[in-house]
Amino acid sequence: MDHPVIGLVANISKPNAAALTQQLAGQFRHGGARLLCELASAEAAGMTGGLPLNEVAREAGVLVVLGGDGTILHIARQLGSQVKPLAAVNVGHLGFLTTAMAEETGEFVKAILSGSYAISQRRTIEAAFTDHEGRPLQATGLNEAVVSRGAISRMIRLNVTINGSFVNCYSGDGLIVSTPTGSTAYSLSAGGPIVNPEAGVFCITPICPHAVANRSVIVNDDVVIELMAAGVTEELLLSMDGGAAVSLSKTSPVILRRGAWTVPLVTLPGTSFYGVLRQKLQWNGGSV
C-alpha cells in the first residue's frame, strides 16, 4: 500500500501554531504518511526540510492547514487552479470552512490517513476589471467580490446588469457578489441570506443601501454580472475575499462570472453544513 503524501502549512501568527505543527507532523509520520511541510511553517516549528507552498501542493494528495477561514482563503488564492484538497484544523474564530477543531486532531489524522472523508467542491467567482491606471486585470475568489467606495465617506451608485438585462441602480457603500461559500462571510454580516454551499448561485447584497427596498438578489451562477459606476463618483475599490483592494477605473465595468476552477474542501464523516451552522451561529431552537 502506498503511503499517503500529506502537505502541512500553518498560519504561524496563530497562538500555538508551532506546537500544533510539530504535533500533527509527528502524528502523520507515526501513521506512515510522507510529510511535506511548507517552508515558513517548518521554520517556525523548528523542523528541517521545508519547501515552498507550490512545491508542497504539487506533490501532496491533501493539504493540511492550521488556521481559520482566512488562512484557507489565502492558500486557495495563492495556489489557484493548482489547489489540492484542503483539510483545515481550526485555530481561528468561526471556521465555517475548516474541517476539525484543534482538540480533535486524533480523529482528524486517522480520517485523513485512512481516506475516510468526503470532498466538497466549492465554486469560485472570477472578476475581470480595469484598474485606475487602465490595466486590464483578472482575479478569482472563493467567497466574494466586493465593489465599494474609497476613503471618502460618500455614497456610491452602481448599475447592475445580468446577461445584459438591467437589474437595479444600487446606492450605498457598495455591493457584495458572493458564492454560496461566501454567504456565511461578509454577505451574512451585510444582511444577506445563508445559502447551501452546493447551490449553483450567486448572491448580490448591497452594503448599507440608501433605499430600504434594495435587498439581496439570488441568481444562477451561469450568468454574467456587470457592475458599473452610475454618474460621477469618487474612488471605487475591488476586493476579492477580503484581500488587498484595487482602485478601479470609473469608466469601465467589473465583469463577474463563475470561476474556471473549484476549491476542494475536506469534510469528515458525520458533519454537515447545517450542523456547522447550528454550532457556529449558536442556534439552539430558542424563541429569542
Image (spheres, rainbow, N blue to C red):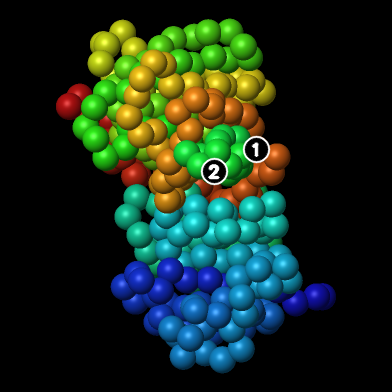
**Image quadrant occupied by the C terminus:** top left
Residue with the mark numbered 2: 141
Q: Find residue 63 and report its image quarter.
A: bottom right
Q: Left or right of 60: which side holds 99?
A: left
Q: Residue at x 32, y 29 (%)?
A: 234
- Which element type, helix, strand or loop, lies under badge 2? strand
| Residue 259 numbered tag | 1
- Which element type, helix, strand or loop, lies under badge 1? strand
* Spot occupied by residue 196 in the image (x, y as percentages of width and height): 51, 31
Q: Which of the two residues, 281 or 72, is positioned nearer the viewer here?
A: 72
Marks 2 & 1, CB-CB < 8 Å contact: yes
Please determine whether, in this image, residue 190 is positioned above or below residue 245.
Answer: above
Please determine whether, in this image, residue 285 is positioned above or below residue 267.
Answer: above
Q: Which of the two residues, 157 or 179, is positioned nearer the viewer here?
A: 157
Q: Earlier in the sequence, mark 2 or mark 1?
A: 2
Distance of mark 2 from mark 1, alpha carbons? 8 Å
